[in-house]
Amino acid sequence: MKTFRTMVGALGLIVPLALVATSAAAEDQLKVAMGQINNWENQSPTLG
């Protein structure tokens, strides 16, 4: 029974720490490089 309590106590400490680490990783920024509209590379569909 003492082992079960120890296991539950350990899970009670590990789960909140895992949730905090997950939310911190979600705050990362993502930068995407996109070309401007009407560059020469994009003119093929426009010119036919």
Image: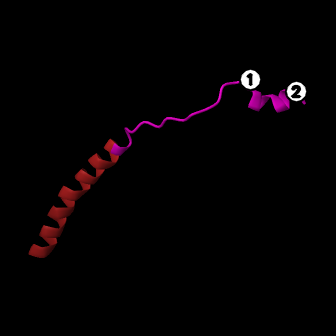
Q: For the image shown, how many numbered marks are present on the structure?
A: 2
Residue at the outermost left position: 2
Badge 1: few (under 14), some or many (20 or more) residues near its Cα, within 10 Å?
A: few
| Location of residue 7 in the rendering, given as x and y in whole percent from the top left corner | 17, 69
Question: For residue 38: magenta?
Answer: yes
Residue 38: mark in rendering: 1
Residue 9: mark in rendering: none
Q: Is residue 27 left or right of residue 48?
A: left
Gap between marks 2 and 1 measured at Cα: 11 Å
Q: Nearer the viewer, residue 3 or 40?
A: 40
Q: Looking at the picture, which amino acid does disc 1 mark?
A: Asn
Figure quadrant of residue 26: top left
Residue 47: mark in rendering: 2
Q: Residue at x 47, y 37 (%)?
A: 30
Note whether 12 is above or below 40 in the view shown. below
Q: Is residue 30 left or right of residue 36?
A: left
Q: Residue at x 31, y 42 (%)?
A: 24
Q: Looking at the picture, which amino acid does disc 2 mark?
A: Leu
On the rendered image, what quadrant is the C terminus found in? Answer: top right
Q: Nearer the viewer, residue 36 or 22?
A: 36
- Secondary structure, magenta segment, majority class: loop
| Location of residue 25 in the rendering, given as x and y in whole percent from the top left corner | 35, 45
Badge 2: few (under 14), some or many (20 or more) residues near its Cα, within 10 Å?
A: few
Q: Which residues are magenta?
A: 25-48
Q: Could you tell me which secondary element the residue under label 2 belongs to?
A: helix
Q: Residue at x 18, y 56 (%)?
A: 13
Q: Nearer the viewer, residue 27 or 31?
A: 31
Figure quadrant of residue 47: top right
